Amino acid sequence: MQQPDAIDLAMMRILQQEGRISNAELAQRVGLSQSACSRRLAALEADAIISGYHARLSNKALDYKMMVIVHISLSGQFAKTLTEFEAAVKRCPNVLVCYLMSGEYDYILRVAAKDLEDYERIHRDWLSALPHVVKINSSFALREIIDRPNVGL
Amino acid sequence: MQQPDAIDLAMMRILQQEGRISNAELAQRVGLSQSACSRRLAALEADAIISGYHARLSNKALDYKMMVIVHISLSGQFAKTLTEFEAAVKRCPNVLVCYLMSGEYDYILRVAAKDLEDYERIHRDWLSALPHVVKINSSFALREIIDRPNVGL
DNA sequence: TCCACCTTTGCAAGGACATTGCTCGCGTTT
DNA sequence: AAACGCGAGCAATGTCCTTGCAAAGGTGGA
């Protein structure tokens, strides 16, 4: 498939905000028939341009009130070291985001915890147990200013 | 409404992964009738326990290939300073996440950019223009290891 | 230029789906 | 024990999703 055209982008923009909108209303908003809209949507999904849909759950309702940013340095940058670390970090369900970084630290993690005690457990049982780690720096989020799922198109 | 029960949690777990699943299939998977499932879902949405649904767009398709973590320090911690900074940062569409932090820096930002040139523009036109900023530290993500929408329940 | 071909659209129909009213069962309260 | 509230299932109605089909528009080759 080629690059998405203007109508595809309009569909994506709407679905980014209202992922469970009905195909009928989506079609109406972008000015297509239901069938054409349905087929375009299927194509976008087939090409993984839209890779999934996710309910956004209130962290408050789930009791995940604490967000922690963790900077981690490893003992080396060998491929094997990185691979082992990454395989381990993927197993921790509280780690929402993990990037290999340029700069002072090797990895940056975003970790969700219910409370301080919960974070202490995560730190002890998961983060400290990660292989090849030589330095962990935890910073606590005091307040959320922005949390968007995607760039505003 | 009270706290979500086991069935609510099961629904949330499924919708977190497959936000556009039909009510019929959702009902079947959690072992409810369609009507009961539909009503529970409406209640979860009404109580903002499920606060929305979002399509996940491939950043590649959208040409946002670059993720930058930005640490920012302000010239002070006065309420007015923080408020003005936050109002300004909210206007930048490339800032996906922004937290007020404890620790060395005051704010941490996650910024999406198409390429280095695009980031240079964002840095010049948006980040440098934010009020009360005394220090900006940009770290580039080399590779994405994890990017989950929510904690694995 | 013309025709064949490919793509994408709209329309229409059939089947699937979502929602609503109703009733029933269960647990709690008075 | 009776009354009440909560949440479930069933059934019906209206809406929605998908598929086949024909036509319009664009493209390339003869």
Image (cartoon, coloured by chain):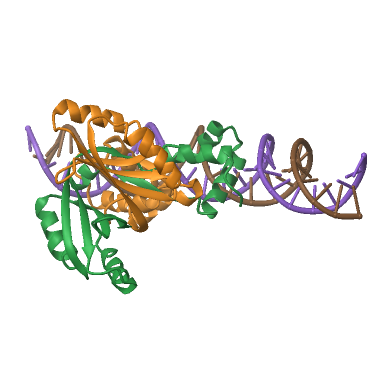
Chain colours: A green, B orange, C purple, D brown
Q: In the figure, residue C29 lies in which quadrant?
A: top left
| B148, B101: nearer the viewer | B101
Q: How many marks?
A: 0
Relative to D28, is A57 on the left or the right? left
Q: Position of residue B92 (x, y in %)?
A: 36, 34
Whether residue B76 is visible here, answered yes or no, is: yes
Task: Write the residue at 32% across / 35% down.
Answer: B128
- In this view, the residue in front, B53 or A147, is A147
Coordinates of residue A32 in the picture (x, y in percent): 60, 35
Quadrant including the C terminus of chain A: top left
Q: Position of residue A18 (x, y in %)?
A: 42, 38
Give me the residue at 58% from left, 45% from top.
A40
Give the camera-side residue of B38 and A34. Answer: A34
Residue B135 falls in image quadrant? top left
Q: In the orientation shown, which residue stands out farthest toward the bottom?
A: A80
Q: Answer with left or right where residue B92 lies relative to residue D28.
A: left
In this rendering, is residue B5 above or below A100?
Answer: above
Looking at the image, residue B92 sits to the left or right of residue A125; the answer is: right
Q: Quadrant of residue B145?
A: bottom left
Q: Residue at x 31, y 72 (%)?
A: A78
Relative side of B114 to A120, left or right:
right
- The location of residue A88, given as percent across then percent down, is 26, 68
